[in-house]
Amino acid sequence: MKRLVLGTRGSPLAMWQAHWVAQALRRAAGVEAELKVITTRGDRLLDADAPAAGKGLFTKELERALLAGEIDLAVHSLKDLPVDSPAGLLLGAVPLREDPADVLVSRQAASLEDLPRGSAVLCGSPRRRAQVLARRPDLDAQPVRGNIHTRLAKFDASSTAGMILARAALTRLGLEDRIRCRLDPADFLPAPGQGALAIQCRADGAEPRRLAEDIDDARAHAATACERAVLEGLGGGCRMPIGAYARLAGDGAALVVTALAAAPDGSQLVKATMQAPCEDLAAARALGLKLAEHLKAAGAEDILRQLASPREDSP
């Protein structure tokens, strides 16, 4: 195969990621790749309530194009990709992962603890909001939508004291100067798969699948497989208040994973850590599922069931 067609969203971050994958394929396999921009439902609903809009908000249109043969590979942010792939598609590769941590953007505060009492903080997900409020219940955690540049513009035009964003997004876009504080991912847990890219391919596309595997990073793939297994085991989507962070310890023989499930207001939070030998992806996934069962038994199942239940005042 001399040329691949990569499907991608059109946001600045998505385009950066797709260009990075194209360059990685060129270096690893000597193959040229062209980009095809595909608009997703999530791109059209930037001001909508993302949790209410359902899963696959930023991926379904790319998956349809992949199944139709319009593209050879789809490039996603792994945290946006639902854990249950459509029939005929699979996760072909997880390239080298960027730092999965969240960060604080602020005009003056050097940490979450330094934010003025009662001040407002913009949080782009229920997971971030829950952890901010669990640590600082006095803060006013407000939602924010849009791509990275849009969120930064909203923050700059507001009187809010801070905003939580993914470090990977700011790093990839050359916006590291906006970072005031890195939040330790073992303490302030990221979304499962945060900082990693997903290369999705057709199960019957042998050549594109082989080329994708050339840029797979075994450590990143194992860690994110474990994190996504936690999400799968808890039955949550990427917009639920669930965090997970897995890392290979020492020489990579063992995998350590920490995960949590929380109420959106931070009033309830269940968190635990487990460790096990990491022999392959199956072992990594088994560890994540085991931790999910532990969390459910410790109260996470009740928390998530309440979130999934229709509210009495819903139309």
Image: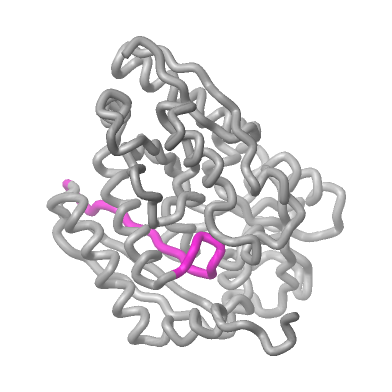
In this rendering, would 232 be left or right of 58?
left
Seen as rendered, the residue at the extreme front is 68
Q: Position of residue 218 (x, y in %)?
A: 24, 40
Q: Position of residue 23 (x, y in %)?
A: 43, 19
In the image, 58 versus 254, the foreground residue is: 58
Q: Report the quarter where the N terminus lies.
A: top left
Say whether residue 237 is magenta: yes
In this rendering, would 282 be left or right of 239?
left
Q: Is residue 181 visible?
A: no
Residue at the image point whose x is 52% and y is 42% from the top: 168
Q: Is residue 10 above or below residue 283?
A: above
Q: Position of residue 303 (x, y in %)?
A: 50, 83
In this rendering, would 266 be left or right of 142?
left
Q: Report the quarter where the C terminus lies.
A: bottom right
Q: Is residue 70 above or below residue 50?
A: above
- The colour style of the image is one colour
In the image, 9 versus 63, the foreground residue is: 63
Q: Is residue 259 visible?
A: yes
In this rendering, would 3 be left or right of 17?
left
Residue at the image point whose x is 54% and y is 85% from the top: 306
Residue range corresponding to the magenta coloring? 236-251
Q: Position of residue 294 (x, y in %)?
A: 30, 79
Q: How many marks?
A: 0
In the image, 80 versus 152, the foreground residue is: 80
The picture quadrant where one finds residue 162 is bottom right
